[in-house]
């Protein structure tokens, strides 16, 4: 037991360990059809885990993230995602141009959660395959991604409130409306 505790950095392991190899990085060119999400500006591993959990539960096919080393927080992300981080197809990109090029090459529309020239989430009719781009609440999306958006989408609020929702909350609203639409089409 003491050996397990030492290997797990604590006692919350349930008496089991799994030895695994590192995941291979998926190439964006192999992205699947369906509901795919690009998220930029996430710094907190708990938020990333929460986003993964929500996307997986709502039926998203993949998550696209800027390339960075999250290995320092693997345990946190896996725990916060309730294991969804390991179940989702995750694609890492070095530059946003890769995302834009892939969307164009595969004729997949890119939609941005961005207020400028946006329509309401509830007026949007989502196609079978698309990429939804969402920025973190501090930086938002880059101008390059926004300029290449097929349509900007906004979540209508119930009160006059000018601030953005945090990324996990926005992902929840957006992804479950997309699921609702796909179930009733």
Image: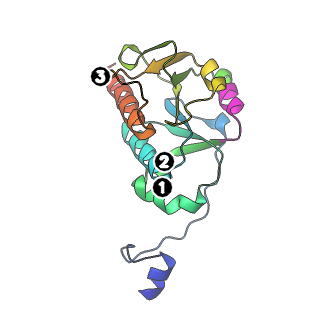
Per the image, is 81 magenta? no
Q: Do the residues labelled 1 and 2 touch (CB within 8 Å)?
A: yes
Which residue is rendered at x = 36% and y = 24% of the image?
Answer: 161
Q: Name the residue under label 2.
A: 48
> Is the C terminus in the top left, top right, bottom left or bottom right quadrant?
top left
Region in magenta: 93-102
Image location of residue 148, percent across then percent down: 63, 19
| Residue 127 seen in the figure | no
Q: Name the residue under label 1.
A: 77
Badge 1 or badge 2: first in the primary sequence:
2
- Dividing the picture into quarters, in which one does residue 150 lie? top right
Check disc 1: other Cα within 10 Å, few if <14, some if 14-19, many if 20+. many
Q: Tag 3's secondary structure?
A: loop
Circle nearer the viewer, 1 or 3: 3
Which residue is rendered at x = 62% and y = 29% of the image?
Answer: 142
Seen from the viewer's position, the closer of residues 63 and 149 is 149
Image location of residue 90, percent across then percent down: 56, 44
Tell me: residue 127, above or below residue 58.
Answer: above
Which residue is rendered at x = 39% and y = 54% of the image?
Answer: 82
Say whether residue 181 is left or right of residue 60: left
Magenta: main secondary structure: helix
Q: Tag 2's secondary structure?
A: helix
Tell me: residue 30, above or below residue 15.
Answer: above
Check disc 2: other Cα within 10 Å, few if <14, some if 14-19, many if 20+. many
Q: Name the residue under label 3.
A: 159
Q: Residue lying farthest bottom?
A: 2
Q: Which mark is residue 143?
A: none
């Amino acid at each position: 037991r003491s050996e397990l505790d030492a290997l797990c950095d604590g006692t919350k392991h349930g008496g089991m360990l799994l030895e695994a190899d590192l995941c291979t990085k998926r190439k964006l060119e192999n992205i699947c059809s369906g509901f795919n999400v690009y998220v930029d500006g996430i710094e907190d591993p708990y938020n990333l885990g929460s986003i993964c959990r929500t996307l997986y539960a709502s039926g998203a096919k993949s998550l696209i993230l800027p390339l960075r080393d999250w290995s320092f927080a693997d345990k946190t992300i896996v725990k916060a995602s309730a294991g969804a981080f390991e179940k989702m197809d995750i694609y890492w990109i070095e530059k946003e141009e890769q995302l834009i090029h892939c969307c164009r090459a595969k004729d997949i529309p890119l939609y941005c959660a961005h207020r400028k020239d946006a329509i309401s989430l509830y007026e949007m009719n989502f196609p079978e395959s698309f990429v939804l781009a969402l920025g973190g609440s501090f930086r938002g999306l880059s101008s390059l991604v926004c300029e290449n958006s097929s349509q900007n989408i906004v979540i209508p609020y119930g009160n006059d409130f000018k601030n953005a929702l945090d990324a996990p909350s926005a992902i929840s609203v957006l992804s479950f409306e997309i699921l609702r639409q796909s179930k009733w089409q």
